[in-house]
Image (cartoon, coloured by chain):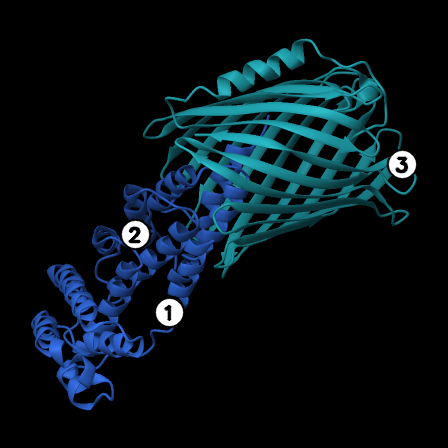
Chain colours: A cyan, B blue
Amino acid sequence: MKHDIRRPAPRGALLRAAWLAAILAAIPPALPAEAKSSALAVFGTESGAAFETSAWGSAEALGKSLAARLSGGATASIGLPGAESSGEAGLSAELSASGGRTVALLRVDGGIADGAAFDAEAGSVGTFGAEILLTLNGPRCSFSLSPRLERRSGDEGRTEYGGGIGASASAGGFVLKPKADASWTEWDDGGESLQLLPSFGLSWYPGFPLSLSADAGFRRSWLSSGEVLDELPCGISCYGAAGDRLFFSLDAYALIDLEDGDFSEAGVAGELSLMLRRLSRGELRLPIGLSWDSEGPEGWDGIAIRLGLELLLD
Amino acid sequence: MIRGLAGAILSIALLALAAAPSSGQEAAAWFERAPGAAGYASIRGAAEAAAARLRAAGLPDGLLAARLEEGARKRIAPERLAAALADEAVRYEAIAAELSSRGLLPELPSEAGGLAERAGLLMRGGTALAEIAAALDAAPRGSAARAERALSAVAAEFSIHARFPLAPAERIALAAALAGSALGEERFASLLAVFARYRAEGLPASRICSLSVDILGAGGSVEGVERELQRRIRRP
């Protein structure tokens, strides 16, 4: 959710964190790991021109039945004069145990953001989440159960207790993914809400280098004010490769308010990524992205173009 | 791009292999009947010797007659064609030995020829015999279609490697993991789309391969592979 605001750039700690992460990402890892750092020029019709640098990395230790994974990174978007700036950093730790066809995973993650990365009107925002994911895998279908807790600080601070139950089953080149999610949210200003979201996803993995995924659900929210919101979140994504050097992706999403039939959020993002050079332990890519985001017919909307370099290491 | 195109052409060729070569001394017959055979009379002895080696290995020599026909059509120089036939004979002998040592070489020469032709085409495309051997070992025992399943696994691995290059050891591990997996053969090709999806997201092919091997090897599914890969690209 982006807002059209103008704030002083948080060039301090977040930018330093981004550069530190970029340096760390460039150190060849000793464990199974990936790292990605990028430097992009971004121009948005609403956000203006900015230079964006980011670095994300992860490493994991794998045992026979236990695995631990740590990932983290930072992004800083430095706006040119008159443009908005933002920054965010996050860290995630996962511990998983597997036995037979059952996998149990505990994930804890946290992050901070400033500027327009989250909700700028809320100022600096901190997030914390914990999730347990229990999965039973079979050759043709799997089931999962995932209770979670999420906490967000700031003006729109809230604590959410939720859980989801889902299944996936394969049929030919398709994977069907029915899911149901429920959550209870307590807002720092005293409000409460209950949300139910049954949804259905479909992924297609044909015998050529392209995949398609689509999902849609029905979300009903009961607010403590007595109001009931009915919404339809939906999305579609497509990823593929042309040869071994050119990759592409296309994502589209919308959140439709069923009361008036208008969307309250929508976006489309496409990216072409050309591998410029294969390195001994990674590759250098040139990504070109174009996106459009909107907060509804009467809200914010804008187009953004991104172009730069990405260094991927493994 | 060229590798991808070559992979696509080879995949189509593999699918087109509906009819297995017939048995008999077809190489010798080719020299008697084929219109362009006169130009290759100088290599007849070498070609018939190679054909005899195939028959001794339990394979129909029609496999070599097909290469003779192809070479003549393309006007390949006799010496080059003779060398290619010798290489082909060595390949087919090795394939027959791998099948035979596992009790998987069909007694019917036409069936044996069909399997050998599929394997030979993969090897001409750059597949190592070790990949085929690993897939044969990994495919479930007791199945009449064990060899076909193993070759389908190698073909799927080949099409992945053609677009997203893998190291030789990774190729062997992936072919074996597919052959020994709980997946139906019709799902092998889905893994190519999974590779494309997560390569587009920036994960290295080696990482996708190792996770696929781990999960398929443990009896997991393509969506299980997808779920693990999704974790790897998740940002906190």
Label 3 and label 2 in one chain: no
Q: Give, as a three-letter code, the residue at label 2.
A: Gly
Query: How far across and down, in percent of the image, does residue B189 sit?
Result: 43, 57
Disc 2: which chain?
B
SS for callout 3: loop
Instruction: Please name the residue that numbered disc 3 is placed on.
Output: A299
Instruction: Please name the residue that numbered disc 2 is placed on.
Output: B180
Within 10 angstroms of label 1, few (less than 14), some, or many (20 or more) residues?
few
Closer to the camera: disc 3 or disc 2? 3
Along the line of sight, which residue is nearer the eye, A192 or A30? A30
Along the line of sight, which residue is nearer the eye, A71 or A178? A71
Query: How far across and down, in percent of the image, does residue A270 sit?
Result: 68, 44
Instruction: Please name the residue that numbered disc 1 is placed on.
Output: B13
Image quadrant containing the C terminus of chain B: top right
Q: How far apart are marks 3 and 1 (CA)?
A: 55 Å
Disc 3: which chain?
A
Asked whether the beta carbons under mark 1 and mark 2 sit within 8 Å of each other, the answer is no
Q: How far apart are marks 1 and 2 (CA)?
A: 25 Å
Within 10 angstroms of label 3, few (less than 14), some, or many (20 or more) residues?
few
Q: Is B227 left or right of A82, judged from the image as shown?
A: left
Q: Give, as a three-letter code, the residue at label 3.
A: Gly
